[in-house]
Amino acid sequence: MNSKIQESMNNIKKSEGEPGKRTCNKLFLASWLFILVALSSGCRSIWQKPDMVIEKLQIAKLSRVADLGAGRGYFTFRIAEALGPEGLIYPVEITPGQISRLNRRADRLGRKNVLPVLATTTDASLPEKMDLIFLCNTYHHIDNVTTYFSNLKKYLKSNGRIAIIELDDLPWYLFTLHSHQTSAETIKKEMHQAGYILIEEHNNLPVQNFLIFGLP
Ligand SMILES: C[S@@+](CC[C@H](N)C(=O)[O-])C[C@H]1O[C@@H](n2cnc3c(N)ncnc32)[C@H](O)[C@@H]1O
């Protein structure tokens, strides 16, 4: 077990009979459980604020958008709706299983503007240049970030943007998420090294960074 959690458990045992500390520990455990539940899929819109995110992205109707590391398409299908029938969204995934799921969901919803793309870990394999490449909770999955994003420029129009949403550095008690987060400073530094400039930084998401980059 994580040593800090173990330490906290020990403190709870030690504090038996000390009402102040007991209340404090219960509050600590309750808030920890609350955060874990809230981060799971059921309550996602509370903290993910997808409508706000899409509003800030200001996607023009005819845009070409890639959802890099789309997963089950949490944002893909919302962006598809915002685009309307004339824009296209390419949910990009490296696992064939996710591609099949995305295809089935697009068929079920009759979304003809959702075109899943099977990529590799080193190349997004997009069929054309994008107005927007969007990543939500995918940044930490990318190996050799600087090289990857440097190569990604070939899929970006000259005025195209890359929007990155990523869990920020969180308090230590979210120990399970530590490998899934990247600080805004690290993202900015790595994107700068890959040849991008920061265009926008939004601070409306409670636990994630929301940064938009473009080409110089
Ligand atoms: C944590 S999930 C996020 C899914 C979705 N964006 C969301 O917010 O619900 C990260 C996804 O990125 C995919 N992924 C990892 N590395 C990738 C890469 N190099 N290119 C494309 N997708 C990748 C994984 O297969 C996984 O489905």
Image: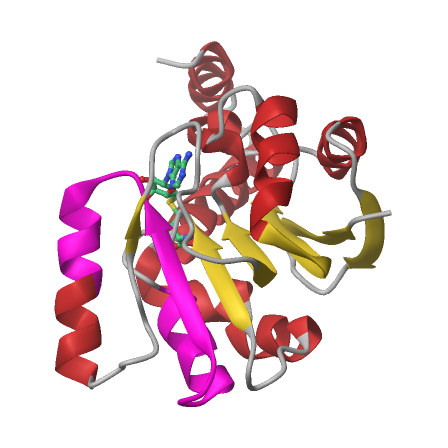
Residue 94 lies in the magenta-colored region: yes
Task: State whether residue 108 is above or below residue 31.
Answer: below
Q: Which residues are magenta?
A: 74-102
* The one of 27 and 23 positioned closer to us in this rendering: 27
Q: Quadrant of the N terminus?
A: top left
Task: State whether residue 127 is above or below residue 96.
Answer: below
Q: How is the image coloured?
A: secondary structure
Give coordinates of residue 89: x percent, y percent: 42, 69
Which residue is depicted at the point 56% across and 56% down?
Answer: 133
* The one of 178 and 80 positioned closer to us in this rendering: 80
Location of residue 115 by image quarter: bottom left
Is residue 142 something that shows in the picture? Answer: yes
Which residue is depicted at the point 45% across and 89% down?
Answer: 84
* The one of 159 and 199 positioned closer to us in this rendering: 159
Residue 140 lies in the magenta-colored region: no
Is residue 167 something that shows in the picture? Answer: no
Q: In the image, ligand 1 is in what quadrant?
A: top left
Task: State whether residue 130 is above or below residue 195.
Answer: below
Residue furthest out toward the top: 3
Which residue is depicted at the point 27% across and 58% down?
Answer: 72
Give coordinates of residue 96: x percent, y percent: 17, 43
